[in-house]
Image: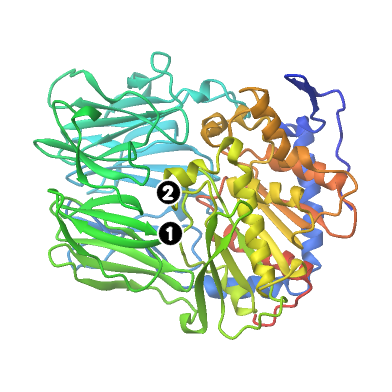
Amino acid sequence: MYPETRKDENVKDVYFDTTVADPYRWLEDDTSAETKAWVKEENLVTQQYLQQIPFRDKIRARLEALWNYERYSAPSKEGKYTYFYKNTGLQNQSVLYRQLDNNESEVFLDPNTFSAKGTTSLAGINFTKDGSLAAYQISEAGSDWRKVIVMDALSKQLIGDTLEDVKFSGIAWKGTEGFYYSSYDKPEMGSQLSGKTQVHKLYYHQLGTPQSDDKLIFGGDAQPRRYVGGGITEDGKWLIISAANSTYGNELYVQDLTIADAPIVTVVDNMNNSTDIIEADDQYFYLVTDMDAPNKKIVVAPLDKPQPENWKDLVAETKNVLDVNTGGGSLFCSYLKDAVSQVLQYDFKGNKLREIALPGVGTAAGFGGKAHDKEVYFTFTSYTYPATIFKLDVGNGKTDVFKKLDVKFNPADFESKQVFYPSKDGTNIPMIITYKKGIKLDGKNPTVLYGYGGFSVSLTPAFSTANIVLLENGGVYTVPNLRGGGEYGQEWHNAGTKTQKQNVFDDFIAAAEYLKTHGYTSTDYLAISGGSNGGLLVGATMTQHPDLCKVALPAVGVLDMLRYHKFTAGAGWAYDYGTSEDNKEMFDYLKGYSPLHNLKAGTLYPATMVTTADHDDRVVPAHSFKFAATLQAAHKGDNPVLIRIETQAGHGAGMSTQQVIDGATDKWAFLFYNIGIVPTKL
């Protein structure tokens, strides 16, 4: 059934006193003719399998009908225009519109014209303070490498400045003269290995000059850091530089832009904590930090003495995790209370003005704006509440619906409830369970257990159009808030890192057992799902407990824990994972759970569909290629083990609507078919 994958038994590595074979290492070269042929053969087998599922086309038709509604982003004011994104329904990419006062809106940028198949996306746009110029980034086929194009925003004409090979970067305008951006030295064509790509650099680009003349501001060989970012305070007076070597913890620097060639001043000189400057006025910097406050707090620092010893608390740490946005002269403090939003409004003296009324229990995001704005916008959503945009009057806190999306979904027919369950070590873990009202708890409901558990990422309630197919057909969608995430602050994050990573898998496994014990599902009806670090979660869970579930869906996963740090940006993930080269204890721990290295020959594994993309340059497809090849060789029994490789796509962002619908179609078809349920609500 599966393509025969060549094994090279001579490829081995020695870690401390242990020799580890890597027979499929040739699959790491995703540009070679042999790898491309393997990808083609694997995709052919996968598509042949999926095509014989009798209800697959009906699932696609249902998803296309569900997706066919107008979708909007919250608006933002740039100069005299208001900008917003809109998708008429099945457009591959959302279109950026603008509007002057109450006049008719007009198209400003249409990414659907960037490429024939809609796989080139608009990956971000930044305007000058007066709104006269804009620099926008485009991503081709989902790559993290971007192109920056500068245009006259008033006339919509390109001015000729185009920057190539920009990666992991914002755009920070210095007046209308130029802007700051970040990038790496691009590796040789086709190379996924680390190296020079790990040294990030902050540049200044002067408009009208070639990119080769751009001035290096920070980073590079003199200050080697993996991640360097630059931002400018709203008053235009200060350049803020953040530098880090991993995905947690950063140094912080400032430069006075009102003085020519002013020195770069150190604010925080180590990477032990996470700190950001969110605003500045004539006296103070306003910072959000988890230094001595794992759940974060807001502090003020004098402009002339911004170091930690001079900080004073403005908004103290609470038992709930803090995120901050500014707009309309206010601080909007969004707290996570058991993974759901609570929003408080403060003034810049630290006085609490009010709690913002939210329409229910869910996730509120946004609240950003200019200091002079009278209104800010936010989006509210939950697993049963389609994303709705609200307008907030900053002066009195009143909220009104700005845009309600016409999704073909009746929230009254469904419910979400939060439960808490004990993990293996007794730690209480929250989980939200969503289903159609009136389902029987007889253990026969098709159930998706979705998780992440890493990098301080918080999984908060959010509506998914794709999930309607599951819920309409009596399914249950469940999301536990595993350790390693950010739902309860830095201590919760740390409890799922390095040699405590097994806590994450134990939390996930305990969630599955809770669902079975309480009648939501049983092994034969359970699917586990996750992407990226969540793909690692699924891979580790299915190799440790292959009898836990019927279906496994690891997407764009980190699956080779011994070599992950050798590819593209992988070395920056070491705060969470550690590396196989740190010491023998760390190597042994990683090898003990690495999904690739824990597949055992002759084992009955769940029906598995590994998914990845050929242009993923963040979690390179080699992880999924090697895992799938090893799994196909090791697996016994009738459960299919397939790999679906999306072409002209990356790690997920920027995928066309058609690619998203096709992926969801195959996911649900594979799941229902292998659970043995024919979905009737199509």
Residue type for callout 1:
Ser
Image disc number at residue 122: 2
Q: For the residue carrying disc 2, how many other residues have a C-alpha within 10 Å: few (<14), some (14-19), or many (20+)? A: many
Establish if 339 lies above or below 14: below
Q: Position of residue 183 (x, y in %)?
A: 42, 29
| Left or right relative to 656: residue 502 | right
Residue at the top extreme? 222
Most foreground residue, 331 or 480: 480
Residue at the left extreme? 282
Can you see residue 266? yes
Q: Could you tell me which residue is drawn at 42 percent across and 77 percent down? A: 406
Q: Could you tell me which residue is drawn at 67 percent across and 56 percent down? A: 509
Circle 1: element type: loop
Establish if 199 lies above or below 222: below
Establish if 116 lies above or below 517: above
Q: How is the image coloured?
A: rainbow
